[in-house]
Image: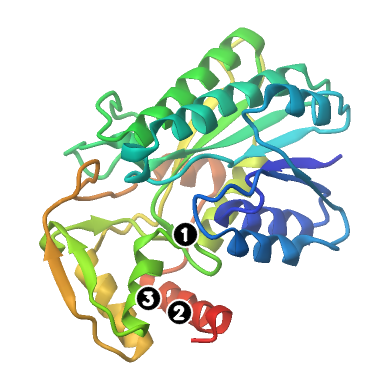
Amino acid sequence: MPVLVTGVAGFIGYHVAEALLARGEAVIGLDNLNAYYDVRLKEARLARLHGRRGFDFLRLDIADRAAMADAIGRRSDISRVVHLAAQAGVRHSFSHPFDYVQANLVGHMVILELCRHLPRCEHLVYASSSSVYGGNAKLPFAVEDRVDAPVSLYAATKKADELMSQCYAHLYRLPQTGLRFFTVYGPWGRPDMSLYLFTKAILAGESIHVFNHGDMKRDFTFISDIVAGTLAALDRPPPVDGGPAPHRVYNLGNHRSEPLLRVIAVLEQALGRSAEKILEPMQPGDVKESFADIAASERDLGFHPRTSIDEGVPAFVAWYRDHHRA
């Protein structure tokens, strides 16, 4: 039975679909190919999936309830769903807030309703974000920490998704797992992420903008580790019994909070060029540090991230140079 993967033309969605196909699963990929960033990158990811045995693609907007019901609601063969479609990015939310309401709130609601009516749906895995921790000063961030003080609309929508999922797991015994991703990077990554932006600027001989004067740390997590954790979660649905609602939330991070200036130094070495840095204040909606406590993910999912930035950053640079012929 096929796995439905939403956001299949996105960074994580593409890699998850590829891994599912590689292990012999059938995949129904869904994406609306919106123009948040260059659609050509999304189309290039899709081109690598098209023609693969077991892959079908539907161009749909998850927030279009009627179209989703018509295309997906009548399927009786979908047993598992990996819901990764979302409006990403923090800064974009300041100028386009309703994009987040539509994609992240309405879209998540549509997926929940579809899943509860799919006759064979055994598990919904969905993307949350480390952004839900907001300005939490307690490190590392653990799933038991309070997350009721978001500093961006994006973070607020992701926390709302977790609450909606908890509600549906309680009411309808729909097994669900939410994954809080920490600063995912790697080949085929998003052009709005710092590593991509820095690489593009340095190769063009342009300066890079470094916020909070470089005094920031991030738990950079390589895409292959994220995919491994996502598939491990998909294969381990919460039990549906007389106990609590079958809903769990996990951190997927590298459990290494790297200083931003060190990451830039590794990038400079991989590129063989130095960066001209423009140090700027902290941006609205940003946080100084992220750091994942992955004890629960290790215990329940067997999650063990393996890729350090010393390996991952050069791998990204190699892909970037090849893809852009730079």
Q: Position of residue 46 (x, y in %)?
A: 71, 60
Residue 7 shown left or right of residue 267 in the figure = right
First in residue order: circle 3 vs circle 1: 3
Q: Looking at the image, do the residues carrying marks 3 and 2 touch, with CB atoms under 8 Å apart?
A: yes
Q: Which one is closest to the eye, mark 1 or mark 2? A: 2
Residue drawn at 32 percent across, 81 percent down:
202
Residue drawn at 37 percent across, 85 percent down:
270
Quadrant of res 177: top right
Q: Residues within 10 Å of mark 3 (few under 14, many from 20)?
A: many
Check disc 1 and give the amino acid type. Pro
Q: Which one is closest to the eye, mark 3 or mark 1? A: 3
First in residue order: circle 3 vs circle 2: 3
Q: Which mark, residue 305? A: 1
Check disc 2 and give the amino acid type. Val
Q: Secondary structure at mark 3?
A: helix
Residue closer to the observer: 102 or 152: 102
Quadrant of res 1: top right
Q: Looking at the image, do the residues carrying marks 3 and 1 touch, with CB atoms under 8 Å apart?
A: no
Q: Secondary structure at mark 2?
A: helix
Residue drawn at 37 percent across, 84 percent down:
203
User: Label 3, label 2: how many angstroms apart (C-alpha)?
Assistant: 7 Å
Q: Which mark, residue 297? A: none
Q: Residues within 10 Å of mark 2 (few under 14, many from 20)?
A: many
Check disc 3 and give the amino acid type. Thr
Q: Position of residue 67 (x, y in %)?
A: 75, 28
Q: Which mark, residue 317? A: 2
Asked whether residue 142 appears in the rendered view, the answer is no
Q: Position of residue 241 (x, y in %)?
A: 66, 14
Q: Secondary structure at mark 1?
A: loop
Residue that numbered label 3 is attached to: 199
Quadrant of res 50: bottom right
First in residue order: circle 1 vs circle 2: 1
